[in-house]
Image: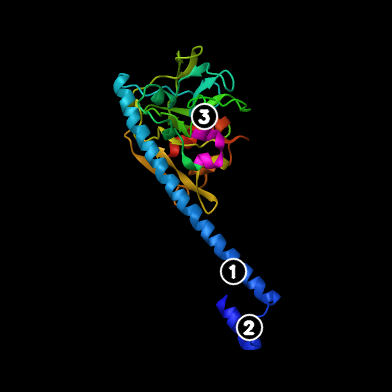
Amino acid sequence: MKELIATRRRKSGSAGAFTLTELLVVIGMTALLGAVLLSASFTTQERISRAQCVSNLRQIGVGMNLYCAEANGYVPICGWAQNQNPWQTYEACRFDSAGSPNLTRGFESLGLLFRTKAVVDPKTFYCPSTARINSDFSYDLYATAPSGWPSIPVGYTGNPYLRMGYNYYPQLGATERINSPTYGPFTLPKLTYSLVQLEFGTPLSLPSPAKLTELNPQKSITTDLVNMTNQLSHRATGSVAGLNALYPDGRVVFQNARTDSRTGINSPWYYWFWASEYGPSNDPSAFRIIMNYWKP
């Protein structure tokens, strides 16, 4: 700016009005600087969010061990009902309607960690990056006054399900062979079902109760949401950067989408683009395959 004014003075002896070209140059430089600063701000925000997400998952891992110690070695029951869709793995409980205190199902999955006080702060169950993308997966939504967390606010128009910001899906060491009509044959951690009576609601056919020692230590137990590609939380310059995964031994490992050497059909990222219309949230085979791919 000073150089432009100095140039004008040298030419005319005054700091007269700028030409249109000079104004366009200044505006362009200002816009570019603003874009750079905004980009840097988002990058810093994402770093902070990712660190908070890692901290959350580590606390969930500690809570899992506390829960197991009180439950004869069993991990919380997964809420994915038989013949239904795997989006239920992020659900903690259900209410009969918005604003109602009456539970019709639950507690289940990570919700059991809160119910048993193995994890006392419910904010732990929400990734800040996910909450920015979709408020349905934010702590604030379910902590609305006067009831506080867990509750569904009066006037909420979605299903009265209490959602958490992570998928909970324990994977057994035992395996089975499946032959998906869409994806072909796969060897995956075995998935069996049992009739389970939760604290609230009628008995449900849920994944059979499993002990921590029965889980495969090389397979994730909880991850950032994997339901749809547009909800993948951790991003860099607008594209998916990866996700965090918690393993049975308490490790949290970032699964990097950019440096993953597994490409094409052998990459977990492939299945988001070939899953059903609603992504892995409504595609049991794609969900199981994706969850099977994460590595500690």
Q: Which residue is mark 2?
A: 8
Between the C-alphas of marks 2 and 1, the distance is 19 Å
- Residue at (63, 83) in percent of width and height: 8
Q: Identify the amino acid type marked 3.
A: Tyr
Disc nearest the viewer among 2 and 1: 2
Residue 102 at x, y percent in the picture = 53, 16
SS assignment at label 2: helix
Overall secondary structure of the magenta stretch?
A: helix
SS assignment at label 1: helix
- Residue 142, labelled with which disc? 3
Membership of 256 in magenta stretch: no
Q: Identify the amino acid type marked 2.
A: Arg
Q: Which comes before the other along the chain, label 3 or label 1?
A: 1
- Residue 29, labelled with which disc? 1
Report which quarter residue 17 is drawn in: bottom right
Residue 266 at x, y percent in the picture = 48, 43
Q: Identify the amino acid type marked 1.
A: Met
